[in-house]
Amino acid sequence: MGSSSGTCEIVEAREERNTRKAPDIYQSNSECIMSAKNQKLSVLKLGYKDDLDDDINKLFESIALKSSSRDLGLLQNGTTPKLKSASKKPITMGVPRSPRVGTSEPVNLKQALRDLCISKASEMAAMKRLSKSTASPRISEVGKIQTLYNSVVAETSRSGPSFVESKGGQIEIPLVPEKGKSLCLLKTSQSNQTAEIVSSTRNIHSSWGFAVATAQNDSGTSSIQSDLACSSSKVGIQSQRVVPVETEEQACASSPSLCSTFGSKSEVPKNASSSKKLGDKSLVSNTGRKGRLQTVSSSSTSVNGNRVNKQPRHAPRTVKSVIKNKNLSKKKLKDDSGSALCGPTPNEVNKPAPGTPRLVCERCRCALENTCEEKNQGVVTSGSTSSGNGLNLSNENSGSNKHGSVSTGSNKSKTVSKVKNTKLKEQLEFSQSSKSSQGEYSSSTSTSDESNVSGSSRSTRPHMSKDVRWAAIRHAQMQHGVLGLRHFNLLKKLGCGDIGTVYLAELIGTSCLFAIKVMDNEFLERRKKMPRAQTEREILRMLDHPFLPTLYVQFTSDNLSCLVMEYCPGGDLHVLRQKQLGRCFSEPAARFYVAEVLLALEYLHMLGVVYRDLKPENILVREDGHIMLTDFDLSLRCAVNPTLLKSSSNIDPAKVSGLSAQSSCIEPFCIEPSCQLPCFSPRFLPTAAKSRKLKVDLAAQVRSLPQLVAEPTDARSNSFVGTHEYLAPEIIKEEGHGAAVDWWTFGVFLYELLYGRTPFKGSNNEETLANVVLQSLRFPNRPLVSFQAKDLIRGLLVKEPENRLGSEKGAAEIKKHPFFDGLNWALIRCAAPPELPDLYDFGVSDMMNSQGNGAKYLEYKAGEHVEFELF
Ligand SMILES: Nc1ncnc2c1ncn2[C@@H]1O[C@H](COP(=O)(O)OP(=O)(O)OP(=O)(O)O)[C@@H](O)[C@H]1O
């Protein structure tokens, strides 16, 4: 190519020939170049002899060496755009000339000129070649691009021609990210990743909604679990407790993988924008992000419940921490984009994310706070005053100094540290141990009498969280440190049992009334009743149910163990029954009481407590008319394994003779047979047929709801415990017994409420026991009792425990019985209880008033049961 260029002017004949060969690029400039050469030639001819070719050649040669500058000057004289363009040969200045230029070989003038042109053209060509083939430092940028271009060409040529060369030699590279590509390719892939992230984010939002919905669906069943596990979370389920709208973190908990994606989403925009500044680090970052994205996208290509469920448990915490520490994550990305945050490989997920320690600390702090709270709530008292042997009456007037003079003797400085168990821990212990309160008990309890701190705290008594008595107790604790009997005015002895005496007491400085069960440890030791006291205390500490007593404080004063409980001013059901017309309750009233007792028993069974001592005397009536099941010293503790039954159809229909239909009616005691239709159903029913169909459908739906069954079916005891008339046949026969004894006693209890007497009562205890085992069940003609009620009693008073209603699935079976049709179990707490006689008939108010006028309080003498004296 170079050999022929630029020769047009010198050799006319050859010009044509050569111009044909010359590239267009040079052809356009040929005229200008030739004219310039001609000018030079004419100048030369004027100054030199014609025959002195050699000299001329030499002269030309020397001129040629300086031609560039001269040419430039010449060309500038005849400036045209084309000329300028042609003269843009500074790049040739440093480039070695063509071998033919500069040689001393004798040539004629024409030839020399021709060669000059050729050499220039060839120089240009050579430079072009060089620029393509070499990577001179001076052309490094171009060279790099060219190298990349070449590599792309090489790569793509292997996989196919996917790039396009466009006008001007620009190259369009398809935006296909490939691993191992150079910078520009990675940048390209980053763009793709960003797009991918955005796309993933969209998926997350849509699938997040799904996760929320799932959580909400689960909330119904989880609420029961939360109660069981007792941690506020669960429910977090954290009984959590479900918020109608999940926060990000909550969504993370329910959908860890989604959160992982979510985390990346939140980091995307800034990282994407900042990546340009990161230089080489951005490559690492990109790689990391890419890895993460791939992980996410591979796992989130189909966001579904299965995938979410497959996430390890610890994942949410890691992810949560990622989100919580979003800022940290971003910073970390800049510093070390290859960290766990960026590349959540399975292993890395297990590693604590940067925010995890903080999270853990938060948890620890929470735990500590709880412990502290319990320390404050659970009062240790070791009375410091000594006043002889007992609980003396105090006539000190009201006020802060109005203490009951409690005989406390020496300070025993009971240790607190032993009993900082959380309720959950307690429940765990209980569920893992199988202990009874009597014969079997010797195998022991974990809490000794030394442990006098109540495990109760407001935080573990959700149903009592608004109770003013908690506030009063807390305030007193803050004021006095630890509480003791001296901080209470004992107003009245409520009753006396096997292991202690119960007093009505007022917390000094407040108008809050409590029932304090006082037990003399020495007496209990002497009578070997300490295990029963311990059982009761331990059970009381774990309770949190509206129909079971709340234990506010537990303390030991000297040798007296005291349980400060909720006071029930309504007396017990035995007394209340006596006050009813015909000494028995109406069926609706009986149904109300047995329903609440059933829920209390169900709860106890869930906790692994077989109550064993059901009778009207142990059912107290609260101020609001609802009941409270009390007295747990005969209870049997055992293991329990609550299960959720998918459908109630598993319940044996043989045990339920009537049709069972649950109602969703908002009225808890809507017993109208026709009112099977929930009050929430559409009010405008076109036809009766449609209405009936709706009723049936709804009843079927309710029946098909999952049911929690927590019957301690494995519980066994050989103890002879209970009250004669209430003893189950298997206890009398000493065959060993379990939770089914509670369903027997439940039947006897319902019978007594309805008929005013127990079914197998004999003239003496022996006869009663014999009747229980041998006599068949009979119903008196009076009062009139419904078929459903009798049917339920029949189902419960089956002598063989294995065939007894409730023996298999516990309260769930019994709740299904038609006797409870129309009852909304969930709202029973809101139901209006049966009417009560005036509470103040019990004389409490009068007594308090009289004491305010200077009456004395109570006196206790050690070694005896606490005596009640009212002056
Ligand atoms: N929280 C309370 N509120 C009101 N009265 C109560 C309360 N707790 C117990 N009583 C009353 O105190 C009396 C004694 O109760 P306690 O539980 O000590 O003995 P018990 O019920 O006879 O059972 P046991 O002999 O098995 O201990 C009972 O008759 C009961 O009515």
Image (spheres, rainbow, N blue to C red):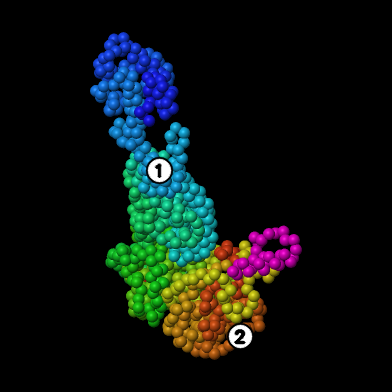
Residue pointed to by mark 2: 778
Q: Earlier in the sequence, mark 2 or mark 1?
A: 1
Depth check: give the residue in front, 23 or 713.
Answer: 23
Which amino acid type is marked by label 1? Val
Where is residue 145? Give x, y as percent: 37, 37
Q: Residue at x 36, y 47 (%)?
A: 180
Q: CA distance from mark 2 to mark 1?
A: 100 Å
Residue at 48% over, 50% down: 200
Q: Is residue 353 visible?
A: yes
For residue 114, side relative to residue 600 (left or right): left
Give the quadrant of the C terminus: bottom left
Other-residue count near label 2 (Cα within 10 Å), few / some / many at <14 / 14–19 / ≥20: few
The secondary structure type at the circle numbered 1 is helix
User: Dot 1: few (<14), some (14–19), or many (≥20) neighbours within 10 Å?
Assistant: some
In this rendering, the answer to whether 126 lies above or below 663 is above
Q: Residue 164 placed where, x, y %?
A: 46, 40
- Quadrant location of the N terminus in the rendered image: top left
- Which label number is shown at residue 153? 1
Q: Which segment did they paint magenta?
A: 675-704
Q: In the rendered structure, find residue 628 and report the number of the disc placed on it.
A: none
Classify 516 as above or below 72: below
Magenta residue check for 689: yes
Is residue 822 among the parts visible in the rendering?
no
* Picture layout, residue 467 above or below residue 51: below
- Residue drawn at the location 31% of the way across and 36% of the way down: 134
> Which picture quadrant has residue 457?
bottom left
Q: Residue 784: give x, y in percent of width and height.
A: 66, 78
How far from the left and from the top, in percent, is residue 39?
36, 13
When the figure is inspected, residue 511 is found, relative to residue 725, above or below; the finding is: above
Q: Secondary structure at mark 2?
A: loop
* Residue 463 among those drawn in magenta: no
